[in-house]
Amino acid sequence: APGNGTVGGVVAFLAGGVATVSGAVRADGAGFRGGARNADFCNGSCTCRTDDAAALDDGMCRMGGRGEGFDTSATAFGATGCGMGNRGVGGGGGGHINAGGAGGGHAGAGGTGGAAWCASTSNGGRPGAAIAAVSTETALTFGGGGGAGQQNNTSGTNGAAGGGVVFVRAASLVRAAGASITARGAGATDSGNDGAGGGGAGGAALLRALGATMCPTVDVSGGRGGTSTAGMLGGGGGG
């Protein structure tokens, strides 16, 4: 099951003998959760001059919700965790008016959210950060969630979840034809005339075998950011 902030998000199996990987083993979109789009909000007269109402942190959640990451404080993710600023690997939400959410980060940084309705206003979510280089033999971590787009016309979209974790340990590892292991970040849904969400970052996979090893195809890539019908209000891609 996907991670819910307490449990889930991990696919793991141990074998004392030969482990044969056949078909697809997936933890796609099972990692840190994406941010939620805000309730419809537009400051004042909804003109370009009001775009400066955006903020890196917005406890009232008039901006898009930021993606989940390692920060577990109340203002990082959830009901009061909104604003353009990222919190570690969690991508920032879209700023006022209608900016796109940022992609989550992990091995690489996420993409910046698309500009606000006024093209000259760079109020897109700030990208989820890349983590410091850590060996997967030491720590296996989720991909960061993407930030949500900002909306005032009920057509923005949420950020997408990051990839989960796959861990396999066996005496020896054999792959069947076409076998694959994936922990990809999810892609965000496209939006209407509002900001789109950012993509989730790729997760992690670790395969360990004492003897002969025939590894399957492994994919831990980030997900795409959503596209807006309004053009430049799209979300950033996941790292």
Image: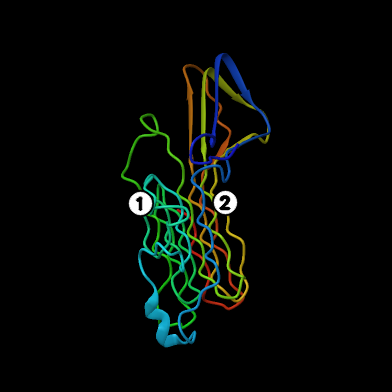
Q: Residue 8 occupies which quadrant of the picture?
A: top right
**Label 2, label 1: how far apart the Cα atoms are:** 18 Å
Q: How is the image coloured?
A: rainbow
Q: Secondary structure at mark 2?
A: loop
> Against 75, is 139 above or below?
above
Residue in view at x 51 percent, y 43 percent = 31
Does residue 131 appear left or right of residue 111 in this picture? Answer: left
Does residue 77 appear left or right of residue 190 in this picture? Answer: left
Q: Nearer the viewer, residue 46 or 121?
A: 46
Q: Give whichever of discs 2 and 1 has the lower sequence position.
A: 1
Residue in view at x 36 percent, y 54 percent = 87
> Callout 2: 10 Å neighbours few (<14), some, many (20+)?
many
Q: Could you tell me how many numbered marks the image carries?
A: 2
- The residue wearing badge 1 is 88
- As shown in the figure, which amino acid type bears the numbered disc 2? Ala
> Callout 1: 10 Å neighbours few (<14), some, many (20+)?
many
Which callout, 2 or 1, points to the residue nearer the camera? 1
Q: Secondary structure at mark 1?
A: loop
Find the residue positioned furthest to the top.
16
Q: Residue 193 occupies which quadrant of the picture?
A: bottom right
Residue in view at x 54 percent, y 63 percent = 37
Does residue 3 appear left or right of residue 76 in this picture? Answer: right
> Against 44, is 167 above or below?
above
Q: Nearer the viewer, residue 13 or 156?
A: 156
In percent of width and height, residue 209 lies at: 49, 21
Does residue 192 appear left or right of residue 9 in this picture? Answer: right
Label placed on residue 186: 2
In percent of width and height, residue 231 lies at: 56, 77
In percent of width and height, residue 114 lies at: 47, 71
- As shown in the figure, which amino acid type bears the numbered disc 1? Gly
Residue in view at x 49 percent, y 41 percent = 5
